[in-house]
Structures are given as structure tokens and as C-alpha cells.
Amino acid sequence: MKGLVPQRKKIKYNQVFKNSWTEEEQFKKWIKQGKDEYFAMCRVCNKDISIKSTGRLALVRHQDSAMHIKLCRSQKKQGTLTDMVVFKGGPNQETGYPRFIQIYKYCV
Ligand SMILES: [Zn+2]
């Protein structure tokens, strides 16, 4: 029946900049708050990153972007590029090595 369909209210929780991010090892060298609470700013790229919809994930994506990595490399003053290796899953019974390894690049 028409008219009985409940209206879907789109409740969006906007993500805001968290100061704790500036203390995270992988972010602290390049992150600062952007023009308002919905933006972080990358000091390496000089770019505003919208965190409104994806929050911290936007930062992770940014630091892994080709542009950021390239600028990181070219700005020696900013430090060097380091691989952050994240081990996921328990060790393989036979080899003793972790099953999944994910590598992020980030500026230090
Ligand atoms: Zn950047």
C-alpha cells in the first residue's frame, strides 16, 4: 500500500577530527586539523582531507595514496618512507609465519 512505507530517515553521523590521531605513530608527522572539524590536513601534500564520511579510514587511504607517497619521498626533510607491516591472523601451523601480511606505507 502506498503511503505506508516508512520513510527512511537518513541519519548520518558526521565524523570529526580527533586529536588522538595526531598522536598515532603513522599519522603524527603529517596530520593536523584542517579548515574545520570535518577536515584533516596533510602537511606533506598541503591538502585538506575530508573525514566527514569515512573518518580515520580517509587518513589511512590518504597516506597510502600515490601522491602522498611520492611527496613523502621527495621531501627528505619530512623523513623517510617506512613500511608498516601488519600481521593478521595467527601463525601458520606448518611454517610458523603469519598468514596474512598487509603492508602500509607511511611517512616517519
Ligand atoms: Zn599527504
Image (cartoon, rainbow, N blue to C red):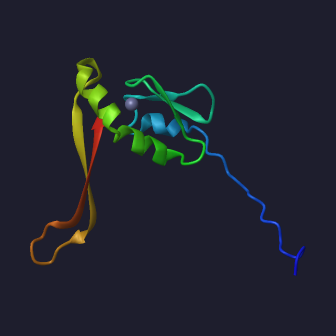
- Front residue of 57/95: it is 57
Which of the 4 quarters of the picture holds residue 38? top right
Which quadrant of the frame does ligand 1 lie within? top left
The reply to whether residue 51 is visible in this rendering is: yes
Residue 82 in the image: x percent, y percent? 22, 38
- Front residue of 49/25: it is 49
Asked whether, in this view, residue 95 is left or right of residue 25, the answer is left
Instruction: Look at 12% across and 70% down and name the residue there.
Output: 96
Q: Quick one: quadrant of the C terminus?
A: top left
Placement of 73 over or under 55, stated as above or below: above
Q: Quick one: quadrant of the N terminus?
A: bottom right
Q: Residue furthest bottom?
A: 1
Instruction: Look at 54% across and 46% down and name the residue there.
Output: 55
Q: Residue furthest top?
A: 77
Placement of 87 over or under 93, stated as above or below: above
The reply to whether residue 25 is visible in this rendering is: no
- Front residue of 62/82: it is 62
Asked whether, in this view, residue 57 is left or right of residue 108, the answer is right
Which of the 4 quarters of the picture holds residue 81? top left
Instruction: Look at 15% across and 78% down and name the residue there.
Output: 93
Residue 73 in the image: x percent, y percent? 23, 27
Instruction: Look at 39% across and 25% down and name the residue there.
Output: 45
Residue 80 in the image: x percent, y percent? 22, 29
Asked whether, in this view, residue 3 is left or right of residue 66, the answer is right
Q: Residue furthest front?
A: 2
Which of the 4 quarters of the picture holds residue 64? top left
How many numbered marks, from 0 up?
0
Residue 89 in the image: x percent, y percent? 28, 68
